[in-house]
Image (cartoon, rainbow, N blue to C red):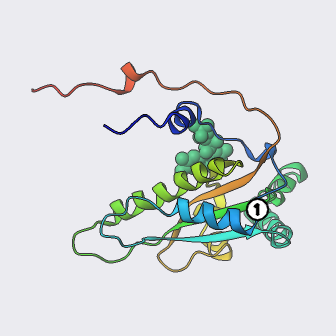
Amino acid sequence: MMPVNAALRDYLMNRRSVGQAFLKEPGPNGSELEQILTMGTRVPDHGKLNPWRLVLFAGEDRAHIGDKLKEMAKARNPGMDETDLERERMRFQPPLTIGVLSAPKPHPTVPEFEQLLSAGNVALNLVNAAFAMGFAANWVTRWYAFDKDAARFLGARERERFVAFVQIGTAAAVIEDRARPRLEDIVSRWQMT
Ligand SMILES: Cc1cc2nc3c(=O)[nH]c(=O)nc-3n(C[C@H](O)[C@H](O)[C@H](O)COP(=O)(O)O)c2cc1C
């Protein structure tokens, strides 16, 4: 048996996300980002298809994206009040957001379902990689992952869909944990019927 990796065990035992409101500057620098991307894309992937693609949102682009999202939100919900519209404008405010696109490839034996799951692996691994580098992170999708025009604006190509926007920054608060499932509620031993 391999020795216990105490640091990894303790991390996984206590891991929790840090919401957007608490993701502040600084974000990862170039070399930190490269490591996060390398770790994040080292995932189980049936058929070695790399059925995903990443888009980075950072720096000055964030303001432009915010303006456009606000405009799109208003067009879709003309009754939306200014506070909610401002919230839409701020969605990409954390120092770095990594969009994870599921980009399935035609394959005779690996169904799209499995390729989609592999993209989910990338999303959670990016979250974990960000924490490994001393940052904090949060996985969101929100309406612009599902709205075709918004997703295209954010970089989705034909037949691709966003499975995550992984927001990354420096934690500005210690986040209280939320209730976790009781194992007895979600785990059972198989029984012959
Ligand atoms: C696929 C997926 C989409 C999510 N989308 C959102 C979202 O749009 N908005 C949101 O507030 N939280 C969203 N969440 C939940 C956040 O990731 C949340 O912070 C997380 O569940 C906290 O759990 P943790 O502390 O165990 O990481 C999403 C989670 C998943 C897995």
Quick check: 191 above or below 149?
Answer: above
Residue positioned most to the right: 82
**Local secondary structure at mark 1:** helix
Quick check: 192 above or below 133?
Answer: above
Q: Where residue 90 appears, x then y in whole percent?
A: 83, 57
Residue at 38% x, 58% y: name it: 44
- Which quadrant, please, contains the C terminus? top left
- Residue wearing tag 1: 73
- Which quadrant, please, contains the N terminus? top left
Report the side of 110 relative to 76 (left or right): left
Quick check: 14 above or below 59?
Answer: above
Report the front residue among 151 and 56.
56
Residue positioned most to the bottom: 158
Q: Where residue 72 appears, x then y in whole percent?
A: 76, 67
Residue at 53% x, 30% y: name it: 13
Q: Quadrant of residue 178?
A: top right
Q: What is the tally of numbered marks visible in this picture?
A: 1
Category of crowding for the residue at label 1, using alpha-carbon neighbours closer than 10 angstroms: few (below 14), some (14–19), many (at least 20): some
Q: Quadrant of ligand 1?
A: top right
Report the side of 193 relative to 45 (left or right): left
Q: Quadrant of residue 146?
A: bottom right
Report the front residue among 6 and 120.
6
- Kindly identify the amino acid type of the residue bearing the numbered disc 1: Ala
Report the side of 17 relative to 4 (left or right): right
Report the front residue among 177 and 171.
171
User: Does mark 1 have its CB less than 8 Å from ligand 1?
Assistant: no
Q: Where residue 32 appears, x then y in whole percent?
A: 69, 62
Residue at 63% x, 51% y: name it: 140
Quick check: 170 above or below 29?
Answer: above
Residue at 43% x, 34% y: name it: 4
